[in-house]
Image: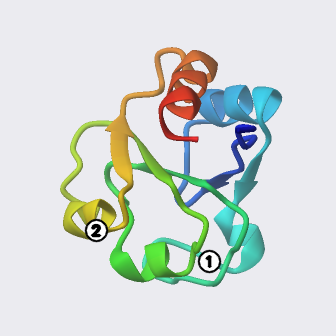
Amino acid sequence: MQKQTPRILAISMFPQDLKAALDKKYGITDYTTLGGAPGKPVPAAGYNIAATMGVFGIDAATMDALPDLKLVACNGAGLEKIDLVEARTREQESRRDVHRDPPRSVERLRQIFL
């Protein structure tokens, strides 16, 4: 079975160094370029990872707009703004703190989930 290449969608603002590291290794699309934002979902097929900050999170409506979503990666402290119940019903996992070594963290998550 061939594994998918991660397609990362940045749901919220991100520290520039983290965004640059992810973009260099995998490419990352800013949700705002598609017209979306935290709390303002727009359909975006083909993205299997949603990256967000703990202060913004991701809600069920945004998850609904991402039909290929397999993983929510959260940078920062806390998961309280991520709808974990909804994520679990979709067999997704949420992980936080990819900031220390973003490429290694995303690669590890890719091995686990994709």
Disc 2 to disc 1, how far (Cα)?
23 Å
How far across and how far down the image is residue 111, in percent?
A: 56, 27
Say which residue appears at 53% left-offset and 15% top-offset.
101
> Which amino acid does the dot numbered 2 rest on?
Thr
Of 71 and 42, nearer the camera is 71
Say which residue appears at 48% left-offset and 80% top-offset.
64
Of 71 and 34, nearer the camera is 71
100 vs 99: above or below: above
Say which residue appears at 33% left-offset and 48% top-offset.
54
Query: Which quadrant would residue 11 be assigned to in this image?
Result: bottom right
> Which amino acid does the dot numbered 1 rest on?
Gly
Of 110 and 79, nearer the camera is 110
Q: Residues within 10 Å of mark 2 (few under 14, many from 20)?
A: few
Q: Which residue is mark 1?
A: 36
Helix, strand or loop under label 1 = loop
Which part of the image, by quadrant, shows the C terminus? top right
Judge from the rendering whether residue 85 lies leftward or rightward of residue 25; answer left or right.
Answer: left
How far across and how far down the image is residue 78, in percent?
A: 21, 43
Of 4 and 10, nearer the camera is 4
Query: Which quadrant would residue 39 be assigned to in this image?
Result: bottom left
How far across and how far down the image is residue 52, in percent?
A: 47, 51
Q: Residues within 10 Å of mark 1 (few under 14, many from 20)?
A: some
Q: Which residue is mark 2?
A: 89
Question: Tag 1 or tag 2, which sits nearer the N-term?
Answer: 1
Judge from the rendering whether residue 19 lies leftward or rightward of residue 15; answer left or right.
Answer: right
41 vs 72: above or below: below
Tell me if label 2 and label 1 are in contact, CB under 8 Å: no
